[in-house]
Amino acid sequence: MDIRGGRCVRLYQGNYDEETVFSEDPVEVALKWQSLGAPRLHIADLDGAARGAPGNLDIIKELASTLLVPVQLGGGIRQLKTIEQLLKVGIERVILGTAAVEDPELVAEACRRFSECIIVAIDTREGWVATRGWQQETRLTAIELAKSMLQLGVKRFIYTDISRDGTLTEPNFAAFTELVNEIKRPVIASGGISSLNHLKMLKQLGAEGAIVGKALYTGDINLKQALDVVS
């Protein structure tokens, strides 16, 4: 679930100028996914990602307190006190992206204090890691970043090929497979997942999980069928 301006939206390839609004009520949407059996809710705070600090805290708090399933959140989380605040209001896992590149010491301390509650998001465009709401490119590869994070105590990753995100095409299976095989740690797949076959393939390739967004809103993926496929 991507939240921007208090609404459920999806961007196309991470472009903030190409936004589709799917709902004005994120809580209603989250309860719907929960009722259909979603085992976990993934939230991206797009306002937070762009400005470097959480931007939809009231809605995030309401989601964390309302839902029975665990919630993980990313977007603009770049300080230890923000991590602490989010965990206290009921977020189960906090996702670090930009901080992983720009502030490794924060990641190390977060892993020391919060362990399994920390996930690092590796978001790439044309093979290079992008940060700051996917607006700034680096000269880091996914594997380079992942290996440096392992040394800091990171236990879980999310991998997204930005060029596939929100496109309803297909995941970057080759890049995902290379990352999983190289680091041998839990990796959650994201970006371009739009069919039950994609989920089957990702499971076979070793994905710990998959984040499905736009395909749920459009009906390309039926959540109940998807859960049956991977169970």
Image (tube, rainbow, N blue to C red):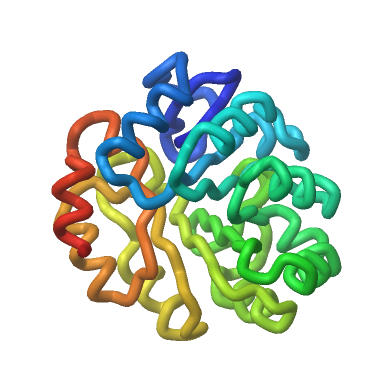
Front one among 34 and 128: 34
User: x%, y% of residue 118?
Assistant: 65, 63
Residue 53 placed where, x, y %?
77, 37
The answer to whether residue 123 is left or right of residue 48 is: left
The residue under the point 44% across, 55% down is: 161
- Residue 179's place in the image compared with 36, above or below, is below
For the point 36% across and 51% down, which residue is it?
39
Q: Residue furthest top?
A: 24
Residue 111: where, in percent of width, then height?
A: 73, 70
The residue drawn where x is 79% and y is 59% is 102
Q: Position of residue 213 (x, y in %)?
A: 36, 40
Q: Residue 154 sits in which quadrant?
A: bottom right
Q: Residue at x 53, y 29 (%)?
A: 3
The image quadrant of residue 41 is top left
Q: Nearer the viewer, residue 85 or 214?
A: 85
Rendered-image quadrant of the N terminus: top left
For residue 120, side relative to residue 53 (left or right): left
